[in-house]
Image (cartoon, rainbow, N blue to C red):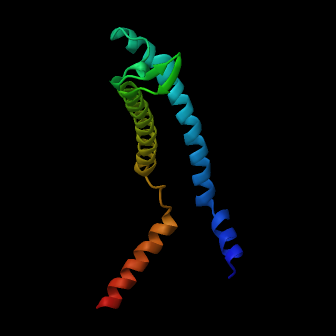
Amino acid sequence: MGFLAEFKKFAVKGNVIDLAVGVVIGAAFGGITKSLVDDVIMPPLGLLISKVDFSSLKLILKEAVVENGEVIAPAVSINYGMFIQAVINFLIIAFAIFLLVRTINRLREKEAAKPAPPVNKEEMLLTEIRDILKTNADK
């Protein structure tokens, strides 16, 4: 099989396409989550700690060097506010994925717990005959 034919076979498989769809939806979901955190959750949380925006929280290790209004060397800082925001993003995404997986697992459990369809009389008789023949064959 040629290289291109093998690649085509791989690329057209359902799993690869499902994965691609998952990545695209995941990226879109990440954008929604980022907006939820940045625009809805962080402002009230920022007010609670008397800051407006977590992303502006930082520990400045070295001040910027400015001469004649021009920045010669930028400030060196640890941007822990951005880290806090990223952690909150992660927790929200992880919680949403947890709820999704939990719901899917519960649906699967319900499906597995459904009783088997009733067996008709003909199938029962055939099963009994099979079991009798099997018992007689073992003797």
| Residue at figure coordinates x 46%, y 71% from the top left | 125
Query: From the viewer's perspective, is 96 left or right of 18?
Result: left
Q: Residue 24, image x and y in percent? A: 61, 44
> Is residue 138 shown left or right of residue 71?
left
Q: Nearer the viewer, residue 134 or 84?
A: 84
The quadrant of the rendering that contains the C terminus is bottom left
Q: In the image shown, does 66 or 55 lie closer to the viewer?
A: 66
- Residue drawn at point x = 50 percent, y = 61 percent: 120
- Which sits in the foreground, 84 or 6? 84
Residue at the left extreme, as displayed? 139
| Image coordinates for residue 31, horizontal then vertical, percent | 56, 32
State the residue at coordinates (37%, 28%): 77
- The quadrant in which residue 94 appears is top left
Which quarter of the figure is the N terminus placed in?
bottom right
Where is residue 133? Give x, y as percent. Answer: 39, 84
Residue 99 in sight from this viewpoint: yes
Q: State which quadrant residue 101 falls in.
A: top left
Is residue 139 depicted above or below 90 in this figure?
Answer: below
**At 42% across and 23% down in the image, what residue appears?**
64
Q: Nearer the viewer, residue 123 or 16?
A: 16
**Residue 66 screen position, x and y as percent:** 47, 20
